[in-house]
Image (spheres, rainbow, N blue to C red):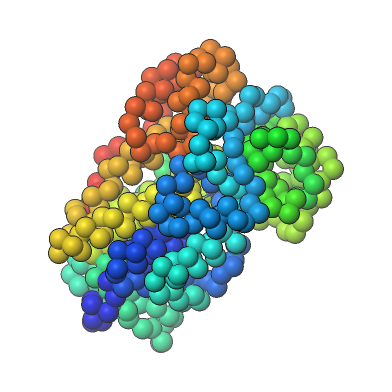
């Protein structure tokens, strides 16, 4: 059995969630080890941030670094209908003109490397190219991890194990607590284009969400540095991958041709590089923490990508977990209840985003029509789109939205145990 005092915490994965929790725990003075299977920079999807990440970036000391990079400023989200009609963009600064209302569109290879370097600078030990194979338990208590493949494994001991391994959900799978979402099942094909047509002015950096003509799916349009734009189509796998041939690029191009709102934006554009395929089936672990262990970011849950909430939730859960772990260490109580004390707050915020996801997928719903019928709700919608979901009262908008959808929202959040 490894010595549990070797490190205060070992963090599995050096993506945004792992880098956040590692930086903040190192700031608290703990001995932190981050183990990342890949060597950065590496490709990753998830380029559009949410403005409510601002306060976490501030705590991490990342604001100046992000501001100095050439990342496009994201000041808005815009929805485009199946016929190609643009709705009025939701400008974040309209409700609050502060710097915290603007965020960035980030190439993830560079962003993740900046985040992980920042964790190092704050005192975390980072080892890249090291894959964790399993978490070690002494009874019910996590006491460290195993690294390496069969035959040459090494055990590393820690008081707390934080799983930030992303969609591989290492610990939730090991414990058999990963629950697929009942209804949110999508796949995505995406690629990068040069010279896509962007709007001018403050909508130039917008994330644009464009419904496909048959409303089977939607496109994202995310402006990146150096004239590149990330373009992806999201739809149920049965639609996107069944009976469509082996070449995802031809499926992507076929879908572009069927979607007036994206086709005209790509009329003079040229694809750069290959097409990528991913399945983004939503899921959630039944527990966020147990004795000696905590799950954060995608290692805890993944919500449909429609509102670009993934990195925001990775940052926030990393921040919440860092404070809970620090408190638990101070109190000498590493029980699941104590370590997972942030779970209900996280779940409540995620539930609001999830309810808005269901609204978008209701075929009878249109943001443009809703805005016209309820201009008084615009502020609440903007608050949801910027990620203001951890403060109460924003959820009231669903009392009104409910009358504009035909499907009642089912969420996986209710009754989630935290420990
Ligand atoms: C189609 C699609 C589009 C998306 N678009 C957006 C978007 O626009 N905006 C947004 O915010 N989010 C988006 N997301 C979600 C976003 O990609 C994730 O939510 C986000 O990256 C989660 O961060 P994380 O740190 O939890 O996990 P990750 O970023 O996945 O990081 C996990 C890290 O753990 C490492 N790792 C895995 N297993 C091990 C192991 N065994 N040992 C050691 N290391 C390991 C991995 O190499 C990886 O670096 C999208 C997702 C999909 C599928």
As rendered, which of 286 and 59 lies closer to the eye? 59
Left or right of 33 on screen, residue 277? right
Q: Residue furthest left?
A: 332
| Count of numbered badges drawn on the protein | 0
Residue at the spot x=30%, y=37% of the render?
A: 414
Residue occupying the point 46% across, 46% down: 53
Residue farthest along the top direction in this orientation? 373
Report whether residue 7 is seen.
Answer: yes
Q: Quadrant of the N terminus?
A: bottom left
- Looking at the image, which residue is at 60% across and 56% down? 68
Eyeballing the image, is 417 above or below 326?
A: above
The answer to whether residue 391 is above or below residue 271 is: above
Residue 78 percent across, percent down from the top left: 62, 31
Of residues 94 and 215, which is closer to you in this image? 94
The residue most toward the right is 268
Residue 153, percent from left and from top: 38, 83
Q: Residue at x 50, y 53 (%)?
A: 63
Q: Quadrant of residue 212?
A: top right
Visible residue check, residue 190: no
Counting from the top left corner in percent of width and height, residue 94 is at 55, 27
Q: Nearer the viewer, residue 25 or 207?
A: 25
Return the residue nearer the eye: 93 or 134.
Answer: 93
Q: Quadrant of residue 30?
A: bottom left
Residue 64 in the image: above or below residue 113: above
Left/right placement of residue 326 relative to residue 189 reads left
The image shows residue 291 at horizontal and vertical percentages of: 21, 62
């Amino acid at each position: 059995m490894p010595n549990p005092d070797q490190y205060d915490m070992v963090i599995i994965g050096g993506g945004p969630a792992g880098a956040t929790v590692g930086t903040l725990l190192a700031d608290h003075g703990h001995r932190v080890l981050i183990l990342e299977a890949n060597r950065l920079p590496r490709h990753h999807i998830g380029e559009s941030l949410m403005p409510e990440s601002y306060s976490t970036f501030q705590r991490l000391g990342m604001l100046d670094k992000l501001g100095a990079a050439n990342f496009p400023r994201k000041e808005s989200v815009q929805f485009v209908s199946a016929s190609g009609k643009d709705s009025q963009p939701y400008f974040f600064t309209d409700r609050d003109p502060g710097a915290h209302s603007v965020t960035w569109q980030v190439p993830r290879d560079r962003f993740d490397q900046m985040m992980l370097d920042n964790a190092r600078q704050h005192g975390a030990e980072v080892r890249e190219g090291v894959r964790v194979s399993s978490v070690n338990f002494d009874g019910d208590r996590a006491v460290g991890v195993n690294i390496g493949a069969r035959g040459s494994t090494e055990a590393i001991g820690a008081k707390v194990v934080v799983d930030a391994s992303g969609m591989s959900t290492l610990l939730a799978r090991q414990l058999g607590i990963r629950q697929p979402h009942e209804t949110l099942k999508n796949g995505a094909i995406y690629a990068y284009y040069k010279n896509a047509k962007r709007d001018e002015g403050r909508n130039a950096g917008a994330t644009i969400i464009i419904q496909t003509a048959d409303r089977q799916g939607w496109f994202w349009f995310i402006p990146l540095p150096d004239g590149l734009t990330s373009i992806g189509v999201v739809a149920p796998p049965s639609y996107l991958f069944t009976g469509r041939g082996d070449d995802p690029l031809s499926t992507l191009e076929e879908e572009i041709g069927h979607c007036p709102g994206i086709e005209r934006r790509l009329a003079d554009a040229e694809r750069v590089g290959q097409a990528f395929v991913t399945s983004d089936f939503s899921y959630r672990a039944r527990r966020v923490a147990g004795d000696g262990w905590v799950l954060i970011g995608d290692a805890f849950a993944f919500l449909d990508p429609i509102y670009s909430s993934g990195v925001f939730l990775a940052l926030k859960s990393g921040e919440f977990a860092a404070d809970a772990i620090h408190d638990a260490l101070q109190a000498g109580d590493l029980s699941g209840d104590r370590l997972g004390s942030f779970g209900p707050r996280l779940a409540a915020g995620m539930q609001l985003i999830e309810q808005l996801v269901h609204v978008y997928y209701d075929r009878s719903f249109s943001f443009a029509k809703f805005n016209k019928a309820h201009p008084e709700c615009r502020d609440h919608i903007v608050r949801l789109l910027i990620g203001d979901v951890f403060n109460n009262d924003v959820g009231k908008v669903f009392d009104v939205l409910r009358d504009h959808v035909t499907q009642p929202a089912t969420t996986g959040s209710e009754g989630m145990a935290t420990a």
